[in-house]
Structures are given as structure tokens and as C-alpha cells.
Amino acid sequence: MSFAVALLRLLMCVVWLQEFEILMENTYGLKLLEQFMKSEFNDEVLRFYLAGRSFQKVEDPAEQLKVAQGLIHQFIDPDGLTPITVLSAMITDLTTKVENKE
């Protein structure tokens, strides 16, 4: 790797430390974060975060409900596909909000 490439990567890391959104919008940065999260056995949290960002872009209320139910099934439900660690009070609150379509 050339000095210029190494310097550019270092500068990007400095920017990412200061602004998380820039990291999340950068393909290379996101890949590095994903690799780090996998090495820490915590990549499901990143997948949950990215799924949440996608959920925020859904405008149709019916589709929002469907996506929210899918997120709960995959990440929040203790028996889900890739459950994340969430306080039980938060699980109850999230489930209630989705059931009540809030």
C-alpha cells in the first residue's frame, strides 16, 4: 500500500471518529465497522441499526407496521433470528407500540 493510500485511510478514520454519519455513508468505513463488529461478536447490533435506518425511510403506515413487526421478530424477540440484547422493559414497550400501531 502506498503512503498516499495509507494517509488517506488514516484521515478518513479521523473524520469517522468525529462524525458517525459520514462513516455510515462510506462503503469502506461501513465494511471496516462490520468487520470490527464481527470480531467482537456483536455484528447483529450493526445490522439492527442499519435496519432501523431503513425503517425510518418507509413512509406508508401499513408498510411501516409490517417492517416494524419484522424488526421485532428478527432482533427484539428473544427467540428471533438474530436477537440483540435489550432490556425487558424496552421489549415490552416496543412490542406494545407496534401492536397499538403507534
Image (cartoon, helix red, strand yellow):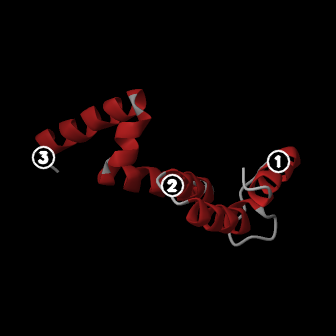
Numbered marks: total: 3
Say whether disc 2 or disc 3 marks the residue closer to the N-terminus: 3
Mark 1–mark 3 Cα distance, whole angstroms, equals: 51 Å
Give the crowd class for mark 1: few <14, some 14-19, many >=20 residues within 10 Å. Answer: few
Q: Which mark is residue 2?
A: 3
Q: Residue at point 50% right, 57% down? A: 58
**Which numbered disc covers residue 12?**
none
Name the residue that disc number 2 marks: 50
Which residue is more in the foreground, 102 or 45? 102
Image coords of residue 47 (percent x, y): 55, 59
- Disc on the earlier residue, 1 or 3: 3
**Location of residue 65 by image quarter:** bottom right
Q: Nearer the viewer, mark 1 or mark 2?
A: 1
Amino acid type at mark 1: Asp
Mark 1 residue element: helix
At horizontal 65% and vertical 68% (from top left) the residue drawn is 70
Disc number at residue 93? 1
Is 83 positioned to the left or the right of 18 in the image? right
* Label 1–label 2 contact, CB within 8 A: no
- Of helix, strand and loop, which one carries label 3? loop
Give the amino acid at mark 2: Leu
